[in-house]
């Protein structure tokens, strides 16, 4: 847990299918209410990945907007959370020398989300639309279980929330039904240790900001 971080540059070294399956099997050991085990993973490879990347990139560049399958950010965003968001962006773009006013540079880096950061494994995480908020919470534990399982096997990951902005496009590109709700993408592979972007470090808030004792 202390070593894991979001990795946005990967080696070309492939991930063995048996290793990917082992990591996914370990991830499913996460707890879930009534052991319902919500959520699924789709590995997008070959021609399907080329097509999906092209579709997402085109959608992003055109400024197309879709209604997302679930809400994430609070509306309006409280200033305390906004400050965390800005700090995370500064850490990322600062690590690769992109200035705040460099809109083109920031857009170019953001577009890498839709390429799965060129990781050897590209996953789409989905959940059945019949689940409520509790299902998303349980699936979130599976997602983190996946990240920790990957880390334990010498692999790196990055959850890609930007994928959730184009649920209809992803369903159409991959031939999914309307009840397959898009949660996020996941890049997975072996980290490039020399990439500047992988030196990004985001701070965690102090314990007293999210823990208290009532007697």
Image: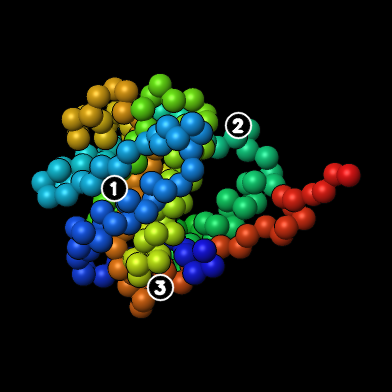
Say which element carries label 1: strand
Say which element carries label 2: loop
Distance of label 3 from label 2 (alpha carbons): 33 Å
Q: Residue furthest front?
A: 34
Q: Is residue 126 left or right of residue 201?
A: left
Residue with the mark numbered 1: 123
Q: Residue at x 42, y 48 (%)?
A: 29
Nearest the viewer among 8 and 212 is: 212
Q: Are marks 2 and 1 in contact (CB under 8 Å)?
A: no
Compared to residue 105, the image places residue 28 above or below, namely above
Nearest the viewer among 175 and 88 is: 175
**Callout in the foreground (2, 1):** 1
Q: Earlier in the sequence, mark 3 or mark 2?
A: 2
Q: Earlier in the sequence, mark 3 or mark 1?
A: 1
Say which element carries label 3: helix
Q: Earlier in the sequence, mark 2 or mark 1?
A: 2
Compared to residue 206, the image places residue 122 above or below, namely above
**Callout in the foreground (3, 1):** 1
Residue 73 locus on image (x, y percent): 55, 37
Please tell me the numbered disc located at residue 75: 2
Q: Residue at x 60, y 31 (%)?
A: 75
């Amino acid at each position: 847990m202390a070593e894991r971080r979001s990795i946005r540059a990967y080696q070309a070294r492939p991930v063995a299918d048996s290793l990917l399956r082992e990591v996914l099997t370990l991830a499913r050991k996460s707890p879930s209410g009534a052991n319902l085990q919500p959520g699924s993973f789709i590995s997008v490879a070959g021609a399907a990945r080329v097509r999906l990347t092209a579709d997402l990139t085109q959608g992003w560049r055109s400024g197309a907007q879709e209604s997302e399958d679930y809400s994430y950010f609070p509306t309006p965003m409280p200033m305390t959370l906004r400050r965390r968001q800005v700090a995370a962006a500064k850490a990322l773009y600062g690590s690769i020398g992109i200035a705040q006013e460099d809109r083109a540079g920031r857009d170019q880096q953001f577009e890498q989300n839709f390429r799965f950061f060129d990781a050897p494994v590209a996953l789409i995480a989905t959940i059945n639309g019949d689940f409520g908020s509790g299902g998303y919470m349980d699936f979130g534990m599976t997602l983190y279980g996946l990240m920790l399982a990957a880390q334990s096997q010498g692999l790196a990951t990055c959850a890609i929330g930007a994928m959730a902005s184009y649920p209809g496009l992803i369903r159409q590109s991959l031939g999914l039904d309307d009840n397959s709700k898009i949660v996020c993408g996941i890049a997975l592979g072996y980290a490039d240790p020399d990439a500047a972007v992988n030196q990004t470090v985001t701070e965690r808030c102090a314990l007293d900001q999210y823990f208290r004792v009532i007697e």
